[in-house]
Image: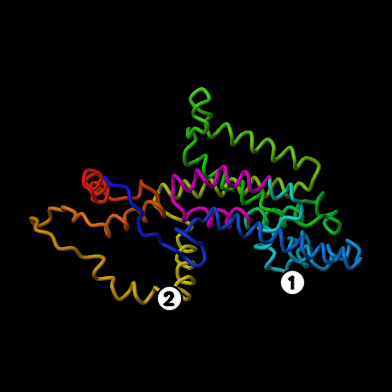
């Protein structure tokens, strides 16, 4: 089979081929640059750091106080993509790459962002609940530090990836590879060791986010995709600004019907480059395991042809 580039599926929101991992990296990096650029402006203007924290960072981080949170509901989202420390950003992005890359490889591109959002929001909810419902924490809630960072989101992705393929091996040249579950144990140990001495609500949020990651994959195996509605919404928003939408709709009938001399109910796929492109896009977005038997047979035949 001759190797040739196939038509890619470019989206405004997720970029080339809907690479959710690159999108998350870009969003987190952009937020870090913006926040620290503002901090530099404050520094050059000889404004004390306390004003930067009060006027900028506090409006992006999640407050533990319920009354303040009611006036800043957007912080449920902003907190999971904002990092103040460069080391916090590097740590979160390294682990996100480690587990997110494997998850995309096994389950496709459309699972990563929903998991990231579910994990981040779950961690935030438990952080607030713990700080307002547990007496020992509630007594100190007025002086408790706000929540900032992608820790809960990354924990959800780590547990989800491990639940999906616990025996997946990385570094195969080292004694046959290291099982993914071992890497996850190391990650969890480092995560909670880092949280030692900090607000217990953060640790509770990470545990809850991990449970969400586990349940996400369990439901996916049962045929229920918790992230489907998010993906449909993203496609709808993307199509609003996509100039190719009308062109695709106009030619949709040509893309879904093929002429073939075959017996009734005897599926023999017509080997066309267009059909091959569509199947490769499906693998890229959803994963090989979601192909139908007919699509797998098509790939098998296409590999033997000069297509």
Please name whichever residue, 301 or 156, is drawn nearer the observer in this view of the structure: 301
Circle 2 crowding by C-alpha within 10 Å: few under 14, some 14–19, many from 20: few
Which residue is depicted at the point 51% across and 43% down?
Answer: 161
Q: Is residue 96 magenta?
A: yes
Comparing labels 2 and 1, the label whose residue is closer to the camera: 2
Between the residue at mark 2 and the residue at mark 1, the CA separation in whole angstroms equals: 38 Å
Which residue is depicted at the point 52% across and 56% down?
Answer: 20
The image quarter containing residue 71 is bottom right
| Residue 143 image point, x, y percent | 86, 57
Q: Secondary structure at mark 2?
A: loop
The residue indicated by pointer 2 is 243
Q: Which quarter of the figure is the N terminus placed in?
A: top left
The residue indicated by pointer 1 is 71
Label total for image: 2
| Residue 215 image point, x, y percent | 51, 48
Left or right of 307: which side holds 240? right
| Residue 305 image point, x, y percent | 21, 46
Left or right of 65: which side holds 78? left
- Looking at the image, is 137 positioned above or below residue 165? below
Tell me which segment is drawn in magenta. 91-120
Left or right of 31: which side holds 290? left
* Magenta residues, dominant SS class: helix
| Residue 123 image point, x, y percent | 66, 53
Q: Secondary structure at mark 1?
A: loop
* Residues at discs 2 and 1 in contact (Cβ within 8 Å): no
Please name whichever residue, 142 or 262, is drawn nearer the observer in this view of the structure: 262
Which residue is depicted at the point 70% across and 53% down?
Answer: 149
Please name whichever residue, 261 or 147, is drawn nearer the observer in this view of the structure: 261
The image quarter containing residue 36 is bottom right
Identify the mark nearer the N-term, 2 or 1: 1
* Rendered image coloring scheme: rainbow
Q: Is residue 254 magenta?
A: no
């Amino acid at each position: 089979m001759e190797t040739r580039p196939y038509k890619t599926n470019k989206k405004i929101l997720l970029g080339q081929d809907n690479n959710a991992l690159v999108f998350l990296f870009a969003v987190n990096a952009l937020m870090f640059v913006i926040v620290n650029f503002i901090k530099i402006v404050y520094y050059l203007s000889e404004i004390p750091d306390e004003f930067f924290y009060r006027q900028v960072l506090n409006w992006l981080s999640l407050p533990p106080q319920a009354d303040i949170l009611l006036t800043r509901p957007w912080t449920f989202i902003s907190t999971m993509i904002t990092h103040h420390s460069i080391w916090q950003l590097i740590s979160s992005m390294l682990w996100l790459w480690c587990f997110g890359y494997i998850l995309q490889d096994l389950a496709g591109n459309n699972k990563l962002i929903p998991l990231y959002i579910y994990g981040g929001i779950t961690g935030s909810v438990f952080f607030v609940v713990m700080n307002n419902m547990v007496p020992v924490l509630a007594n100190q809630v007025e002086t408790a530090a706000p929540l900032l960072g992608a820790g809960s989101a990354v924990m959800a992705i780590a547990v989800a990836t491990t639940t999906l393929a616990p025996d997946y091996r990385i570094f195969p040249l080292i004694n046959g590879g290291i099982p993914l579950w071992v890497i996850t144990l190391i990650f969890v140990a480092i995560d909670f060791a880092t949280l030692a001495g900090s607000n217990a609500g953060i640790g509770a949020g990470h545990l809850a986010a991990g449970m969400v990651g586990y349940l996400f994959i369990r439901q996916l195996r049962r045929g229920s995709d918790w992230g489907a509605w998010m993906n449909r919404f993203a496609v709808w928003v993307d199509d609003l600004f996509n100039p190719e939408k009308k062109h695709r709709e106009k030619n949709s009938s040509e893309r879904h019907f093929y002429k073939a001399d075959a017996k009734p109910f005897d599926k023999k796929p017509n080997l066309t480059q267009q059909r091959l492109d569509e199947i490769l896009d499906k693998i890229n977005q959803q994963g090989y395991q979601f192909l139908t038997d007919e699509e797998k047979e098509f790939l098998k035949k296409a590999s033997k042809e000069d297509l």
